[in-house]
Structures are given as C-alpha cells and as structure tokens.
Amino acid sequence: MPSSAVTNGRTDVEWVEVPVKTAWWIRPRPTQRLPLDPRSARRARRHIRFAPWSTAIAIGMSLAWGVLIYSGAWNALVHTGSRQADEMIYFVVFYLWVFLWSWPVVRGALPAQAPCRSLAGDLYIPEVPVGVAEQWVEQNPGVLTTNEPAPRPYTRRFYATWSAILLGAAIALWTILANDEREDPFLFNFAVPVLLVAGCMVAWGLLPQRPDRLPNWAKD
C-alpha cells in the first residue's frame, strides 16, 4: 500500500484499522487498514473508541432527561417562575448536549474516505485524492478508479419502508398531541422532532447519487 494519506496525500501518515461501512446488523464490523493524516487518525481512533458505547450512552442520557422533566426534578433545579421558560431552558440544554455529543472534536469521526462495501461485495474508498488513487492502481492490479458514488449500505426498499414508518409515526404522534388537551412538552418537543429528523435522514437514501468529483478506488 502507498504510504500516502488517503485523506489529503500527506506522507507523514498513521495507519489505522478503519471500520468498513456495512449494514448495522453485521457484527463484528470488518476493518480496512488505511494510511491517514495525523489529525484524521486521532479523530478516527476516538470514534472507534467511543463507538461500542455510543448507543448505550445516547439512550441512557435520553432516559435521564425524560426522568428529569417527568419527575419534576428539572423544575426544582431551574425555576424561573414561568413553566414555559423552564421548559425552553430544558430543551435548549438537551439539544446543546446532542450537538456536543455529535461534534467530531468530542466524539471523533471517521474520515470521508471510510471504506464501504457494495451489495455485490466490492470495496470502495470514496474521495481519494487523484495522485493517491493512481499510486493504488499502480501498486495493486486488482484496484481500479471510478467516479461512481459510494454505494448505499441498504436496499431502496429498506430506505422506503423505514422512512415511511418514521415519518408516519411523527405525523401520527403530532396529530394525537395536537388534539389532546393535556400538555406533554417532552413528547411534543422531543419525540416528534426526533422521529421527523430520523425519517428525513432515512429518506435521504432514496435520492439519486451524483458521481463524485474525485475518483474512488475499488478493490474486488
């Protein structure tokens, strides 16, 4: 393998076992050893270190926030004299935590060149600089360049089904809460936006992909 970073072509590289993007139920996730620039390598290692605990931490924190507001503990901690102001502060703090947890500086992140495998079994590494891609082709007969976009990890049926389920659940929950005389700020301000955003993110997988500006390299 060429000793040039697949991220920006630098020669002072650090080799990292980068997880291959696959369907979520494939465990353990396969990895591909890639040369990364030092900054990308630090973020990738941080992401890999946190990845096994990310789901548990996110669920635990969400449940803790729910208990805070339903038990009345939040109103005891933050009391401005206005219920609406208390709830607004609560949700500002909650979404700030979500932003910080998803921030690459805190949680780490895989580089844009994280490998992914197509449904046919080909391994793609997207957005590789042209010079680095040419080195891969010269040194590896089984490697070829292409400007085809990186493949989706799931089928179109998967994206269509789950986007419809999530968006339908968001609309149904919003309709129920809008016609319910009881106020439920947690469900209205948290559950509905989460379902809506998740549905839109899944539906994004249905959009046609454009060819990449930089050539990818694929290995059979």
Image (spheres, helix red, strand yellow):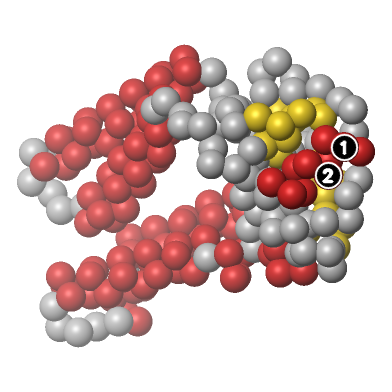
For the question of whether residue 46 can be seen, the reply is no
Quadrant location of the C terminus in the rendered image? top right
Q: Tag 1's secondary structure?
A: helix
Q: Position of residue 137 (x, y in %)?
A: 83, 35
Q: Nearer the viewer, residue 2 or 163?
A: 2
Give residue 65's quadrant in the image.
bottom left
Q: Position of residue 148 (x, y in %)?
A: 58, 28
Tag 2–tag 1 contact (CB < 8 Å): yes
Give, as a three-letter code, the residue at label 1: Glu
Q: Which mark is residue 5?
A: none
Q: Residue at x 74, y 49 (%)?
A: 131
Give, as a three-letter code, the residue at label 2: Gln
Q: Nearer the viewer, residue 45 or 187?
A: 45
Q: Residue at x 60, y 32 (%)?
A: 147
The correct choice, above or below, for 71 with respect to 205 in the image is below
Q: Position of residue 159 (x, y in %)?
A: 45, 24
The correct choice, above or below, for 188 with respect to 137 in the image is below
Q: Tag 2's secondary structure?
A: helix
Q: Nearer the viewer, residue 129 or 64?
A: 129
Q: Residue at x 40, y 70 (%)?
A: 96
The correct choice, above or below, for 135 with respect to 92 in the image is above
Residue identifier under label 2: 135
Left/right of residue 43 with respect to residue 140 in the rendered view: left
Q: Which mark is residue 138?
A: 1
> Mark 1 packing: few (<14 Cα in 10 Å), some, or many (20+)?
few
Point out the residue furthest to the bottom here: 80
C-alpha gap between disc 2 and disc 1: 5 Å
Quadrant location of the N terminus in the rendered image? top right
